[in-house]
Image (cartoon, rainbow, N blue to C red):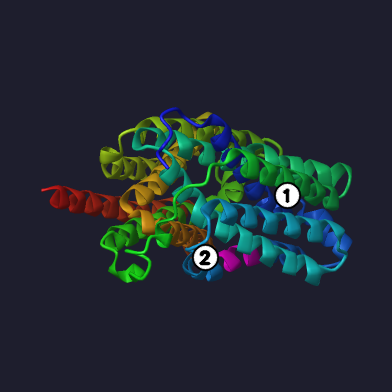
Amino acid sequence: MTSPQKFPWAAMSAIGFTVFALVTSEFLPTGMLPSMSADLGVSTSQIGFLVSVWAATVVATAIPLSIATRRFSRKSLLLTAVTLFTVSNIAAALTSSYAVLFASRIVGGLGNGMFWMIATGYVTTLLPPHLRSRGFLFISGGANLAFILGLPLGSALAAFTDWRSGFLIMTALTLGASVGIYFLLTPVPNPHTETHVAGVPIRRDTTLPIVLLAVSGVFLVVGGGNVFYPYITPFLIDVAHFTTLSVAIPLAFYGIGGSVGIILAERIGRRPSTLSRNLAWAILYMAVMMTLVNVAALTPWTMIVCLALWSVGFSVVEPLFGQYIMEMASPRLRDFAGALRTTAWNLGIGGGSFVGGLLLVPIGITALPYLGAVILVLAAAMAVVARRREIRSAN
């Protein structure tokens, strides 16, 4: 199958909608935490574990799944992943048992790992190089929309009705995503069915070293950002002197910055040959904006501006890294690379927030942005190393 010469808007819209539904499903309990805790008679931390077990399932299963399913149709695997999300949401909506709810999140985590190991590789295989950054825009846009619209909607539903209605709506959305994938997505070639590569071990793939280098960069970028980001609300209240009501303003601008960033990433990513160079600059920019957060805390408006600009940086880096990994990986390595990336992403979230929480008291909340910036500089260095490897290979 040849790549389409025109951008497949319908297929990419189906992918973007699916990402929106899946990301909203993943983080839905965070917006409904108080009502779920009270209704089920469990502690707040136990509801928080529903997000943690999801991420832990992804970390534990994404890479094995990429190996076990590599000869299956890419489109069929996407459908299977969304089906697992639907089963997870139905079980969550209908149960009154915390144990069943916990198990449903494991099922959803399986679907999450399967979806993300396939989705970026599918987009890369379907689209020619000059259209791939636009395809990644739909993936990033769906995730960003989930945080801006989906999660607040879940909180509102829990407040005005009950938390189960949120999961019922997610069930409808994931069913709609399945329909879109089935009718709008085109099957793409699966290199693992080709006889000349079917028996070749992954470790012998010549593109594996640079993929591992890029995945390490993803881990550092996500980890560096999450050293500080989970504690942004207490920082805004205690250091920048926002109130519990007005803190919503800088957080809203953070979301706006993210929307601007993914649009910029689409433009920056149009030339695959410059991806590693642009990544290094974007990561350094993100590090600078993190260090300016403390200075900006002196006045509310500078805080709002710097927070939005920091978000712009992260929302540029994340899709560029995804695109770069897929560009560097050979076709037969793309699903494995996708599994590595989603594993690194979840490890970065968990590891970064853990380190930030561990150091919060001994070094203080105002030191966390500087620590995150140092980690980001290491990630930028990895992008520079990757750039040099590309230049040597080209020569």
- Residue 60 at x, y = what percent? 54, 71
Q: Quadrant of the N terminus?
A: top left
Instruction: Check the image and report above or below for 317 versus 105.
Output: above
Give the SS element for disc 1.
Answer: helix
Chief SS of the magenta region: helix
Instruction: Check the image and report above or below for 387 versus 191.
Output: above
- Residue 193 at x, y = what percent? 43, 61
Going by the numbered disc 1, the residue's amino acid type is: Gly
Instruction: Tell me, yes or no, whether the highlighted magenta stretch contains residue 57.
Output: yes
Q: Which residue is mark 2?
A: 69
Q: What range is drawn magenta here? A: 52-58
In the displayed structure, does residue 129 sit left or right of residue 62? Answer: left
- Residue 94 at x, y = what percent? 86, 59
For residue 31, the mark is: 1
For residue 286, the mark is: none
Task: Please report the residue visible at 36 percent of the width from the left and 71 percent of the height from the top.
Answer: 199
Task: Please report the residue visible at 68 percent of the width from the left and 59 percent of the height from the top.
Answer: 84
Going by the numbered disc 2, the residue's amino acid type is: Thr
